[in-house]
Image (cartoon, rainbow, N blue to C red):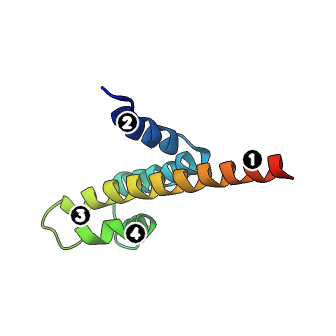
Amino acid sequence: MTASSRAVPRSLRRYLMSPAAVGYLAVVVWMGTDVALTDSLDGSMAGVWLFFLTAPASFLFVALPGALPWAGVVVGALVQAVALGAAHQGLRAWRARRTVSA
């Protein structure tokens, strides 16, 4: 493996392990557990909130048949976690550069 082919998985792992991404994924897992363990979803909005929490990526899967919309929740959660992790890492790098230059 070349160094450039290792950079993408290493970056994704770093982004997914950032505090912002871990916190976001914890909330998604909590909501998913609430949906899975609730006996009756008659008055619960937990399933709807799970789709809103992982939007906009999860909305691309809503029209699919069967249980495939739940795959959209998983994909949406991972996409959002990577985006939050990248933003967190970028903010930390920007803050470090600003502190060094000041």
Dot label at residue 55:
4
The percent coordinates of residue 86 (x first, y second) are 53, 52
Q: Closer to the observer: label 1 or label 3?
A: 1
Q: Which residue in the protein does label 3 denote?
A: 69
Q: Which element is circle 4 on?
A: loop
Quarter of the rendering occupied by the N terminus: top left
The percent coordinates of residue 50 (x first, y second) are 41, 64
The percent coordinates of residue 42 (x first, y second) are 34, 72
Q: Which element is circle 3 on?
A: helix
Q: Are marks 4 and 1 in contact (CB under 8 Å)?
A: no
Please tell me which residue is depicted at 43% across the width and 42% down the height of the picture. 12
Residue type, label 4: Ala
Q: Which element is circle 2 on?
A: helix
Q: Closer to the observer: label 3 or label 4?
A: 4
Q: Closer to the observer: label 2 or label 1?
A: 2
Dot label at residue 4:
2
Q: Are marks 3 and 4 in contact (CB under 8 Å)?
A: no
Q: CA distance from mark 4 to mark 1?
A: 31 Å
N-terminal label among 3 and 2: 2
N-terminal label among 1 and 3: 3
N-terminal label among 4 and 2: 2
Q: CA distance from mark 3 to mark 2?
A: 34 Å
